[in-house]
Image (spheres, rainbow, N blue to C red):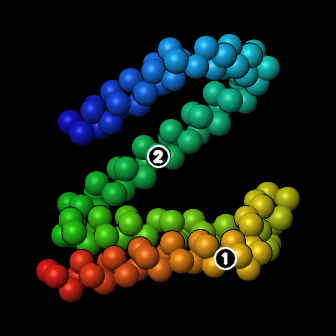
Amino acid sequence: MSLFWLHLGILVCGLALIAFRKGLFGQFVDSVRVNGRTMFGVNFVSEGLSAVAYMVRDYAVLLAPITIIMTLNGYQPVFVFVLGIILTLLAPKLVNEKIKPRHLIHKGSAILIILVGTILIAGTV
C-alpha cells in the first residue's frame, strides 16, 4: 500500500513541476524527440533493476528480522560510494566519481554520520 502512495506522490510532484515551470514540459518533449529510444531503454533497465532489488529486499524481510534488513538498507550509500571509487580507478571512461581529498572528506563525513546514527540506534534498543 505504501508503494501506491509513493508513486502517487511522485505523480503529484511531477504534475506540479509541469504546471509551475512552463518550459519544463517543452524540454521533456524535445528530449523524447532527440533521445526517446535511449531514454526509455535506460529507464526500462533502471526500473527493472529496481523491481528486482525490491523483491530481493522483501524476500530478505521474510527470512530475517526487519530491523536488520532496514538497517542494512541504510548502508546503500556506502556501497555505492565504494563501488564508485573502485570503478573510477579501474574504468574511468565508464564511471567518473570525484575522488579529490575534499570530496572524499565530504562524502566520508556523510557515511560517518550514517554509522554513528546506526550505533546510537543500536545502543537504545
Q: Is residue 54 visible?
A: yes
Picture layout, residue 111 above or below residue 25: below
Residue type for callout 1: Leu
Earlier along the polypeptide chain: callout 1 or callout 2? 2
**Residue in front for this viewpoint, 72 or 45:** 72
Quadrant for the N terminus in the image: top left
Q: Residues within 10 Å of mark 1 (few under 14, many from 20)?
A: some
Q: Is residue 76 left or right of residue 54?
A: right
Q: Residue at x 47, y 65 (%)?
A: 76
- Residue identifier under label 1: 104
| Farthest right residue in view | 93
Displayed quadrant of residue 75: bottom left
| Farthest front residue in view | 20
Residue type for callout 2: Ser
Q: Is residue 96 left or right of residue 49?
A: right
Picture layout, residue 111 above or below residue 66: below
Of tags 1 and 2, the one toward the viewer is 1
Q: Is residue 78 left or right of residue 67?
A: right
- Residue identifier under label 2: 50
Q: Which mark is residue 16?
A: none
Q: Residue at x 80, y 72 (%)?
A: 90
Label 1's element? helix
Residue 98, given in percent of the width and then of the height, sits at 74, 66
Picture layout, residue 91 above or below residue 112: above
Q: Residues within 10 Å of mark 2 (few under 14, many from 20)?
A: few
Q: Is residue 86 visible?
A: no
Residue 95, given in percent of the width and then of the height, sits at 76, 59
Residues at marks 1 and 2 touching, judged by CB atoms closer than 8 Å? no
